[in-house]
Image (cartoon, grey):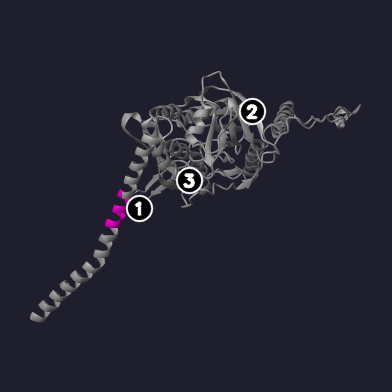
Amino acid sequence: MKKFAVAATGGILLGAIVTTQIAGPLIAQEADNNASVYEQLDLFGDIFERIRAQYVEDVDEAALIEAAIDGMLTSLDPHSSYLSPEDAADMRETTRGEFGGLGIEVTQEEGFIKVVSPIDGTPAAEAGIESGDFITRVDGENLLGLTLDEAVKLMRGPVGSEIIITVVRQDVDQPFEVSIIRDTITLTAVRSRVEGETVVLRVVTFSDQTYPSLEEQLAEQVTEAGGIENVNGFVIDLRNNPGGLLNQAIAVSDAFLDAGEITSTRGRNPNDGQRWNARKGDLAEGLPIVVLINGGSASASEIVAGALQDHHRAIIIGTNSFGKGSVQTVMPLRSNSAMRLTTARYYTPSGRSIQALGISPDIIVEQPRRDPNAEIEEDDDAGFRRSEADLRGALDNDSLTDDEIKQIESDRMRAEDAAALRIEDYQMAYAIDILKGLQVLGANSD
């Protein structure tokens, strides 16, 4: 018993010695780190005082501190930043779906301002601004060296005022200027229409209006088509959609999934991870879905595309998406200011992080660039094409009823409309053709 007690005591003592030997350097290292941090804070205070006392002009002390805070945040990644009370108010307006400006989502890439996407129906889109464009000057002022927020402020201005931006575009030799008239941007979160037997849902942005609008318009277009039995599928157009609210991306994904994970987020602390799963119910009632994406599809758009792709619920068509796979949390601060801080990465159901990689389409389809200066070539032979029906004395087709002939003519008109759409929007026409093909295969298998 004494031996056991001694052995136990010896073990305890040895444990205490080992613990002391390990913990001692760790505590010392932590103390050194803290001392280094305090030294750096002292250095910051010293620099601030010298600027305030010796700079060639009087400085706005509050603005100086705000700039320092913003610099600290923007040094982390392109999406973290300080929001002044005015910027915080602007952000709240944006998520409600109405704000003033040009109508473009921008980011910063190696010091340059890059267009993520123009927003449908806005002055920027109508002026021809494209995803991937770089904006180098605003009214002649060089943007290089400015923060993203500073560049955005230069682009803001009174509604109705003119702004001239200098654009650098891939495959265009020289920078060119674009004149845009600022306007109040009222976002219609979802636009919809029927193309033949296909319901097209164009999701412009993920604001708090998105899911309710999508649900309402999907039902309206199905009714317009004469009921779900007359619909061959759905196209969800996410091209040039810069993203928005995470909860709306989850709701839109859930609308077309019956079960399974939609997305997950993982932060610095493993315990802070979250997962979202779909609930039973599919607004498309199991019909085929095609999702259109391009380089302007970012963030929330990529959550939807990734979820539907991983569950094999949709065919993804277009070009590689933007690749913004991080989550920003807006944290209120004093005086109605806020900070936007990257707090997590999000993942598709299969566990893919799309950060900097994006969503790869199942079928890559480039949108041909149209040259506005190109002359339209007329087909000189178009007026001379003839068929059997044009020949004098041609026999009638007496094997079909009048109703069958009308159906053939109706199908032919739809095919001609689809051909015209290829000129206007090749990617959309391709998506609709895919759904037609699936419909034909389904009919043949019956």
Q: Alpha carbon of mark 2 to alpha carbon of mark 1: how far?
A: 47 Å
Task: Report the front residue among 386 and 79.
Answer: 79
Q: Which mark is residue 325?
A: 3
Name the amino acid type tagged 1. Answer: Pro
Q: Position of residue 371 (x, y in %)?
A: 73, 33
The numbered mark, 2 or 1, whose residue comes first in the sequence reads: 2
Q: Quadrant of residue 27?
A: bottom left
* Quadrant in which the C terminus is drawn: top right
Q: Which mark is residue 270?
A: 1
Q: Does the CB distance between marks 2 and 3 fall below 8 Å?
A: no
Name the amino acid type tagged 3. Answer: Gly
Crowding near pointer 1: few (<14 within 10 Å), some, many (20+)? Answer: few
Q: Quadrant of residue 144?
A: top right
Name the amino acid type tagged 2. Answer: Val
* Quadrant in which the N terminus is drawn: bottom left
Q: Position of residue 433 (x, y in %)?
A: 66, 39
The numbered mark, 2 or 3, whose residue comes first in the sequence reads: 2
Task: Report the front residue among 384 and 301.
Answer: 301
Q: Position of residue 276 (x, y in %)?
A: 40, 44
Q: Tell me which segment is drawn in magenta.
A: 31-38
Let me know if residue 274 appears in the view: yes
Q: Looking at the image, which residue sits at the far right?
A: 392
Which label sits in the foreground, 2 or 1? 2
Residue ID for mark 2 = 178
Residue 237 position (above or below residue 37):
above
Crowding near pointer 3: few (<14 within 10 Å), some, many (20+)? Answer: many
